[in-house]
Image (spheres, rainbow, N blue to C red):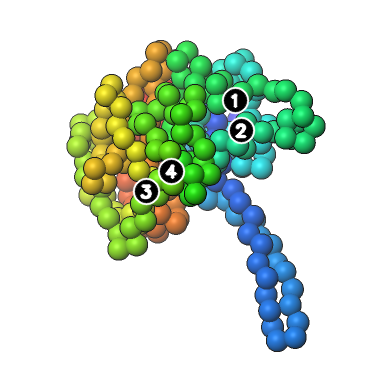
Amino acid sequence: MAKHGVMPLADAIRLLFAGESWVTRSLHIKGFDSFEMSSYHEGGTEMIAALRNGGVEVTYQPSHIAANAFPTTAEELGAFDVVVLSDIGANTLLLPERTAVRSEPTANRLELIADFVRGGGGLLMVGGYLTFQGIQAKGNYFQSPVDEVLPVALQASDDRSEQPQGIHPRIHDAAHPIVAGLGEWPHFLGYNKSTLRPDARLVASFGDHPFIATREVGGGRSAVFASDCGPHWGPPAFVSWEGYPKLWVNIATWLAGR
């Protein structure tokens, strides 16, 4: 059966995308009276659409869904070829309701992800305020099992580099399958700082920090994309860039070892 306008192949890449959702609550004051409003947002819409249009079978778990629905066994996680973590903090995966509220033990899903990679799976971490180490270090992936399998070593503190003037990445490995043939890149408005691991491959950078990097870990592969997949660090010029759809399909394809 066709999904999202694309007929999936029998050997289509199966990708689990977790994160990129949030709720905003605002207080409106109008003279004597005031009232509150709330709204729900998803930030990975364009990336997920690009993957699905490229034939990738995407299972999307917004952050509040992933908290309890993200796989808790190797068998469940093994149903996927690639896992994407985008703007979802480590605590969301470590502290599901049954542990945080009911004090019941549960699987350490960061360890599961690391074992998934070493066993042949693919992992992509996309930058944001709650991945890498993130704003006020609340991403909390530093020295975690996930950190150990990434192509970069994460910082202990707030690792944001805000670049409101706009910056362009430098491509170091134009022949890498992830970026080959993508042409001139648009600007970005910020990224997460990290340090390239000795056995990793630097594909692109912002100054002295990796932007895109890859690594083979055990039987699997990992990659980082140190800026946003969309607004705010990834501005409209990036989302509308002609290379945008191909980029994400390239990353998924490389991570799946296809």
- Total marks placed: 4
Amino acid on which the number 1 mark rests in the picture: Arg
Residue found at x 21% / y 41%: 171
Q: Secondary structure at mark 2?
A: helix
97 left or right of 144?
Answer: right
Residue 9, given in percent of the width and then of the height, sits at 49, 25
Mark 1–mark 3 CB contact (< 8 Å): no
Residue 26, given in percent of the width and then of the height, sits at 65, 67
Rendered image: mark on residue 157: 4
Residue found at x 46% / y 41%: 133
Label 1: few (<14), some (14–19) or many (≥20) C-alpha neighbours in 10 Å: many
Which residue corresponds to mark 2? 93
Residue found at x 26% / y 27%: 201
Check the image and report above or below for 94 versus 76.
Answer: below
Label 2: few (<14), some (14–19) or many (≥20) C-alpha neighbours in 10 Å: many
Mark 3–mark 4 CB contact (< 8 Å): no
| Mark 1 and mark 3: Cα distance apart in space | 25 Å
Rendered image: mark on residue 109: 1
| First-in-chain label (2 vs 4) | 2
Rendered image: mark on residue 191: 3
| Mark 2 and mark 4: Cα distance apart in space | 20 Å
| First-in-chain label (1 vs 2) | 2
Q: Is residue 9 in view?
A: no
